[in-house]
Image (cartoon, rainbow, N blue to C red):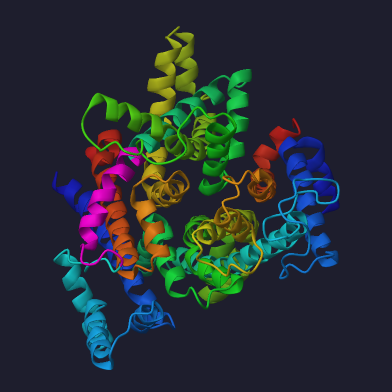
Amino acid sequence: MLKVIRDLLKYDGRFRIAFIFLIAVVVMIFLSFVSPYDPGKSFVVAMDAPPSLKHIFGTDSRGIDIFWWMTFAVRNSLVMGMITALISRVLAIFVGLIAGYRGGWLDRVLMSINDSFVVLPLLPILILLGFLLRDQMNLFLLGVILGFFGWPYDARLIRSQVLSLKERSFTRTAVYSGTNGFWITFNEHLPFVLPIVFATTINNLLWSIGMEVTLSVLGLSDLTTPSIGTALFWANQHGALVAGNWWWIAAPTLVAIVLFLGLYLLFASINEYIDPRTRLRLIGG
Amino acid sequence: MRQFILRYLIPRFLQFLTIIFVGITVTFIIPRLSPTDPVEAQVSMMMARGESLDPQSVASMRAALTDMYGLSGSPIEQYFAFWGRLFRGDLGPSLANFPAPVSGMIGQAMPYTLSLLIPAVLISWVFGNLFGTWSSYYPKNKILSVVEVLGQAVRPIPYYIVAMVLLVVFAFFIPILPFSGAYDIGTRPSWTLDFILTYLQHSILPAATLILVGFGGWFIGMKSLTSNIISEDYVVYAETTGMKESKILSQYIMRNALLPQITGLAMSLGTVFSGALIMEVVFGFPGIGALTMAAVFRNDYSMIMGIAIYSIIGVAIAVFLMDLIYPLFDPRVRYQ
């Protein structure tokens, strides 16, 4: 593992940037545990102070230190993204393996539903859902809901992998020696599929955190919990730009860009690493 | 021709129906799974607004709302009634702008969204494909590498944040473009040159958001699709015959990599439409997105429901239309 990271740091520029950005994110997450301020309390510092040494990202109109609030926001957003990733992974693996291995009418039905979910405009549907659950909504529930909508891309990917694995000789050997189909898919095919599942997990995280931002700026999530989306919501709500408090908008935007770029570059880099041909090209082999 | 209809058209049409079926069923199930009763929520909201209502009128209002939400009868009956109302195109009145029908209000906002969305999607697709092809054909070109890095850097950022950054930079720090809206306050929409020019000026930033976020994906997709093609024998042969580079690029390389990108365009429509909604919120562009925002803030349940349903049907139709023109690009489907 360490060796892989060392190699990637040496040969892949994107991985280097991703590494730096994600270290920054991880540091912020750790800092949230030693925060001098309680994220639930407002009016603890001076209001509307621009960035300074004392308050790195400045303070907002609610008397909250933006930097320390953002440490909680990043942590919460990531945790929510991971809940989504976990649930959608389980669904994607399940649907993908079954559709790929069983084939026939089951495959056609599952992929037909799958493609519908890919094509559907999810935002209006999620807005409807968020609107109805507005009073009950919290980050955990949002993560679960997004998980139920975030699986179709990966299910299709896993299915296409299984389709080719199915034709390999070890599958035939297993079938002829009497192993049951369920066991073959989960025991023999799953290990081949897992690297892709891992790479697309990061993509799923990105999607989920992005959706949280979108729903939160519409006011459709639990607005008292710090997250990247709610940070932007409160800044808009207090008219931060009109009032000239540009740092209130800039801080969550900057944190979001670092997080998104870090994760995306990691995804791109890992995706290439998994494919041995591109890996060879990278190290000039 | 018969083969074409049986093997291509009918499966595509079935998929079109499935998309609508899945989407509408999801929007039917969601309100019924939610623990809040929309009728009670609406009634208590009206009470909270301080309107004094006697018990009898509350009861009749409750009955009217139950009827409007299609909540009377067993779930199965409700489901069929729901489809029946959809076929009649009757999505009820807007609750916030009573009694204006939801369909009419969405119809008014739709041209703004479409007039922005369609050109923006096409521009980002065409430019993404062109630059992607060039980038794999001229791997040493400095400008193309810069374009690639920029495109990849914007790609993962959510639409909302890209829109926000563009707004802050080009309307706040360097105020060269208008802050919000689709036309100046005080002008009325009309087909005059003046209005069209203001409209174009107002749509630069919103369109740029959609184009910038979409571009990177098409770029990297085309680059990886063409990376194998550029070393194919027929390309090398074409080069040795001294054929014009532009012809090699368009007829030999792009032509062979275009099909997955067309399928990809159809697959991405739902996501792009969602992105356009949130982009409109940032720029105060008076399309479906702004309508959604207003509906959320004014608790207009029937409007949100209507927008969800129309978006699903709209995207499904767009995908089906793309399936219909696909054979023009793919001779294998045509001559099957």
Could you say which quadrant of the image residue B77 lies in?
Answer: bottom left
Magenta stretch encompasses residue A250 = no
Q: Looking at the picture, how far across and down is residue A127, in whole percent? A: 43, 64
> Would residue B258 be visible to someone looking at this image?
no
Image quarter of residue A104: bottom left
Magenta span dominant secondary structure: helix
Between residue A119 and residue A12, name the one nearer to us. A119
Q: Nearer the viewer, residue B235 or A74?
A: A74
* Camera-side residue of A223 and A211: A223
Q: Residue at x 31, y 64 (%)?
A: B303
A122 relative to B323, above or below: below
Query: Looking at the rendering, in which quadrant would you find the C terminus of chain B?
Result: top left
In this image, B189 relative to A284: left or right? left
Q: Quadrant of residue A254?
A: top right
Query: In the picture shown, does residue A136 fall above or below A235?
Result: below
Q: Position of residue B86 (x, y in %)?
A: 20, 67
Q: Which residues are magenta?
A: B96-117
Visible in this render: residue B186? yes
Left or right: A118 as drawn, with respect to B220: left
Give the image location of residue B264, x and y in percent.
Answer: 41, 44
Say how many tags the image has. 0
Can you name the residue that lies furthest to the top here? Answer: B242
Q: Quadrant of the N terminus of chain B?
A: top left
Is residue B113 shown in magenta?
A: yes
On the image, the x and y values in percent for residue B131 come to 50, 26
Against A71, is B299 above or below? below
Furthest-bottom residue in this view: B55
| For residue B1, side relative to residue B245 (left or right) | left
Seen from the viewer's position, the closer of residues A115 and B111 is B111
Residue drawn at (65%, 46%), measured in percent from left and top? Answer: A245
